[in-house]
Amino acid sequence: MISLIWKYYSDPVTVVPSRWIAPVERFVVFPIEVAGGVEITCWLVVCNKVVTLGLHAVSKSFKTFYHKC
C-alpha cells in the first residue's frame, strides 16, 4: 500500500461532484487540491473500512446460519 500512496500521491483516484464531499472535502482532496478529487490515502482508508464491514456482516450471517443447523 505504501507503494500505491507513493506512486499516486499527486493524482486523484476519482473525481466526484464537490457537493458530495463538501463537509470533508479539504481532507479528502489533500494534497492534490483538485475540486472533487479523492486522493489515494483516503480511498484506501474507505475501501479498507467497507471491506472490513462487509466481511464482518458475512461472517456474522454465517455464524447465525450454522448455529441454526
Image: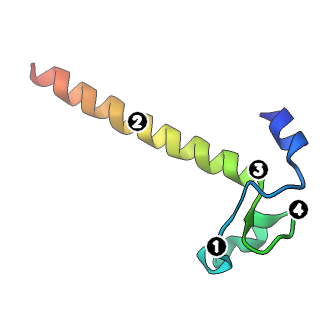
Specify which label sits upstream in the sequence, 1 or 3: 1
Amino acid type indicated by mark 3: Ile
* Measured Cα–Cα span from mark 2 to mark 4: 32 Å
Note whether 58 is above or below 28 in the view shown: above
Amino acid type indicated by mark 4: Pro
Specify which label sits upstream in the sequence, 2 or 4: 4
Q: Secondary structure at mark 1?
A: loop
Residue at image location 74% in from the left, 54% down from the top: 13
Disc number placed over residue 1 in the picture, else none: none
Residue at image location 68% in from the left, 77% down from the top: 18
> Which circle, 3 or 2, is nearer the viewer?
3
Residue 33 position within the rendered picture, expressed as x and y whole percent measured from the top left: 86, 70
Q: Bin the neighbour count of mark 3 within 10 Å (Cα to Cα): few under 14, some 14-19, many 20 and up.
A: many
Locate residue 57 relative to residue 38 in the image: left or right: left
Disc number placed over residue 40 in the picture, else none: 3
- Colour mapping: rainbow
Note whether 6 is above or below 13 in the view shown: above
Q: Which residue is mark 1?
A: 21
Looking at the rendered image, the quarter that the N terminus falls into is: top right
* Measured Cα–Cα span from mark 1 to mark 4: 15 Å
> Which circle, 1 or 2, is nearer the viewer?
1
Amino acid type indicated by mark 1: Ile
Q: Which residue is mark 4?
A: 31
Q: Are marks 1 and 3 in contact (CB under 8 Å)?
A: no
Locate residue 37 relative to residue 64 in the image: left or right: right
Q: Secondary structure at mark 3?
A: helix
Amino acid type indicated by mark 2: His
* Measured Cα–Cα span from mark 1 to mark 3: 15 Å
Specify which label sits upstream in the sequence, 1 or 4: 1
Residue at image location 83% in from the left, 70% down from the top: 34
> Which circle, 2 or 4, is nearer the viewer?
4
